[in-house]
Image: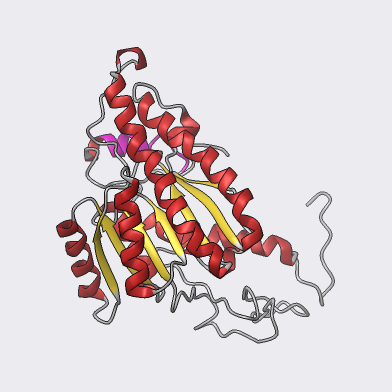
Amino acid sequence: MLGYRKPPPHRPAIAAEGLELMYILYINTHLSRPTLSTGNTGLQMGLDRNSQAPGYSFGDRQETTENRMKIDLADKVAIVTGAARGIGLALARSLTECGANVVIADLSVEASREGVEAIRAEFPDARCLAVGVDVSDRKSVDQMVSQVMSEFGQIDILVSNAGVWKNLTRGPFWQLSNEEWNNTFSVNTDGAFNCASAVAPHMIARRSGRIVFIGSAAIGEALAHITQYVSSKSAVTGLMRCAAKELGKDGITVNMVNPGQIDTGAFTREQLEARAQTKFIHRVGMPKDLEGIVTFLSSDAASFITAQQIYVDGGGVLN
């Protein structure tokens, strides 16, 4: 191969810095049930610094094959909004699997309870809390946060997932009513702001926290005929970046994950299959495809990643 030089026997062919990036990509694309080990010794990778044999760690202990790829969220408290079904429920389930105490928050408390029951059916010992919340109403959000603090005494993770999409009007932007425009922003944009600003003081007090906004790949595509949705999600990008800058000094990271079309019942199977053929990866996206990256960004392993947008769309938007 032109320009390639074989590395000395004592040195790995891939630099450690490159392995970090490869590992993040591996989590996002290969792990439906994310596993990553963190702790006082730092991110554990699996390549010996002085040899090509498995076993390298960025800390001072060796990790075995069985335990070196695990995210540990034990004793963490996570709020997931819009968590009664679909993407939100998948993310709540993933955080629970990694040991977090999870708050299932949705517009209907009955729906939230059904989400809790679904998680406890798989994880009987899980400590979950069902909460009804209207994210567009700051008073309702403040009540949710008060309930969580009363139950758990802390908030470590916010996954702001609640949003409106399915029943929005499709058509030219100039035909949209101001009422629908404002209603879309009240949930998708104001909701993200209300939740983040309500939990931020509690994270600042602990000098630690993770905020993950669920956006949309439609931002990068400039998807036409649903301008109210794209604009409302685009606005969250500015919120994410400014919040990340303001909260960074307190050890709090703020990031955004932008999924493409995911099979949550909002599209027909034919629509999903046709859309998948336009992407690099020709398959339909599922809620579990977001589990790896969101759980990773919620963990201590992502403590130096902030103000970033990550597209999970099978290769549609080149960010």
User: Is 221 drawn above or below residue 313 in the view shown?
Assistant: above
Magenta stretch: includes residue 84: no
Quadrant assignment for the C terminus: top right
Does residue 6 appear in the picture of this structure? yes
Q: Which residues are magenta?
A: 271-280
Q: Residue at x 36, y 33 (%)?
A: 185
Marks counted in the figure total 0
Choose top left, top right, bottom left or bottom right for residue 127.
Answer: bottom left
User: Is 130 drawn above or below residue 244 in the view shown?
Assistant: below
- Rendering coords of residue 150 (x, y %): 33, 71
Choose top left, top right, bottom left or bottom right for residue 116.
Answer: bottom left
Q: Residue at x 80, y 73 (%)?
A: 11
Give the dominant element type of the magenta stretch: helix, strand or loop: helix
Q: Residue at x 57, y 76 (%)?
A: 38
Instruction: Looking at the picture, tell me which residue is in the foreground, 23 or 257.
Output: 257
Instruction: Looking at the picture, tell me which residue is in the foreground, 197 or 27.
Output: 197
